[in-house]
Image: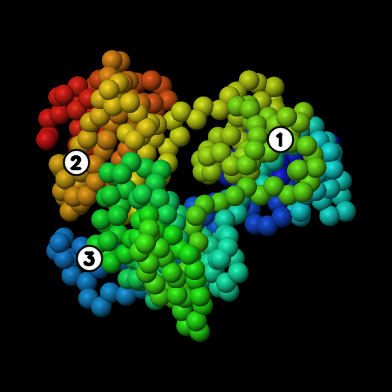
Amino acid sequence: MYDSVIIGSGPGGYVSAIRLSQLGKKVAVIEKEDLGGTCTNKGCIPTKALLTSAHLYEKINTEAKKFGVKVENIDYDLKEIIKHMNKVVLQSRKGIEYLFKKNNVDLIKGVAEIIDKNHIKVLNQTIETKYIILAHGSQPVIFTPFDKIEGIWTSDDVFKMTELPDSILIVGGGVIGIEIATLFSNLGKKVYIVELLDHILPNEDPDVAEVAKKSLMKKGVEIFEKYKVTNVTKNKESYISKVEKDDESKEIESSKVLIAVGRRPLIPKDIKELGVTIEKGVKTDLSMKTNIENVYAIGDIRAHIMLAHVAMYEGIVAAHNIAGESKKMDYSAVPNVIFSNPEIATVGLKEKDVDLEKVIISKFPVSANARARTMEEREGFVKIIADKETKKVLGASIVSPNATDMIMEGVLAIKYGMTASQLVDSIHPHPTLTESILGAEEGIEGLTIHI
């Protein structure tokens, strides 16, 4: 008998399995496909591998001369870019496999069928366990009329491509859509983005989204905000998409159409028959427990915050509770990162969601940062939101090179209730991009030095 069996080896599943083993539990993971789940195989890792190649190409192509570097006949080789991506994905899978062996986690390949809260069938084998963790993950959303048209891409299909389309229409201007638009536009391809809501990156503040929009438009991306795709027809060589806004209508011809409107949880029949409460996704409490005794759920199957790093921490929380400790999820300081040009990272409250009478908002432009000037980077800013009375940091938005790494200062500040003055009193290294954060923090006290 196992102490715990986890269904799914994505970020939440494999991390939870390793932590349970570290806590002295006998653990098995059931996986029907490749180790690592969506993140490793169809999401975070392959996307960032491709973006690294595309960003390097675009950087050399557009900025080398600024730095006195002469490069002639610059080009890229898609086969080699894909080779790099596949290598990184394989390394990630092998890394998880190694960690399982190191931590004595049993890997069982096959489709799991839950019989009851203590028994799972895999192939012809019935496994007995004290606890079950549901970590089934998610899949891309696709709907009419797109699901009826041959060759329409979801984000999963980008990683299977063997040649680049000359042009692509992306339906959805959220994180996935913007990252893929960045990829193709950096490689010199024509990109169209159609976003139904007021602006691209609708979960971010308008000023954050505007920087991303201007950057993409400089590379020839056409962005249609408040538009809806009402019809798509496929010709021999291309797709004709009809997009509408109020009484306005346009037709866009593209080599490919990509649907990037989000993901939905994978909830197979056996989970429904188990009797867990489902509200969009599988419902849990902050201990990650479902309504069924000894059954937990983590990651995208919950349809809550569908991010790999959130799934990982939910897996940690579930593991400690199964091991007899008491641990609760805290979603107050969850970072969101976007690998656009420039990068975007946010945590905590957004300006659009706060009472402006109760907060102080300070912005510091990247153009005033010494390190950014050495890099010929001018676009972006750091924005800090603090409580007007206590000066505690409530939110941070960073639009800057390396924003996805820099955001941790904001995460720690919000997580531990730090004030702007406490952060200002921490010496920031010079010259670094993190001094943009310092500049915004100084602004909370009205003492900004460099603007």
- Residue found farthest to the top: 389
Residue nearer the viewer, 155 or 197 = 197
Residue 39 at what x, y percent from top left?
A: 54, 51
Q: Residues within 10 Å of mark 3 (few under 14, many from 20)?
A: few
Residue placed under numbered mark 1 in the picture = 277
**Is residue 114 something one can see in this rendering?**
yes
Residue 414 at what x, y percent from top left?
A: 39, 26
The mark found on residue 62 in the picture is 3
Amino acid type of disc 3? Answer: Thr
Q: Residues within 10 Å of mark 2 (few under 14, many from 20)?
A: many
Query: Which of pointers 3 and 1 lies earlier in the amino acid sequence?
Result: 3
Cα–Cα span, label 1 and label 2: 47 Å
Cα–Cα span, label 3 and label 1: 53 Å
Amino acid type of disc 1? Answer: Thr
154 sits left or right of 98 in the view: left
Amino acid type of disc 2? Answer: Pro
Marks 3/2 in contact by CB < 8 Å: the verdict is no
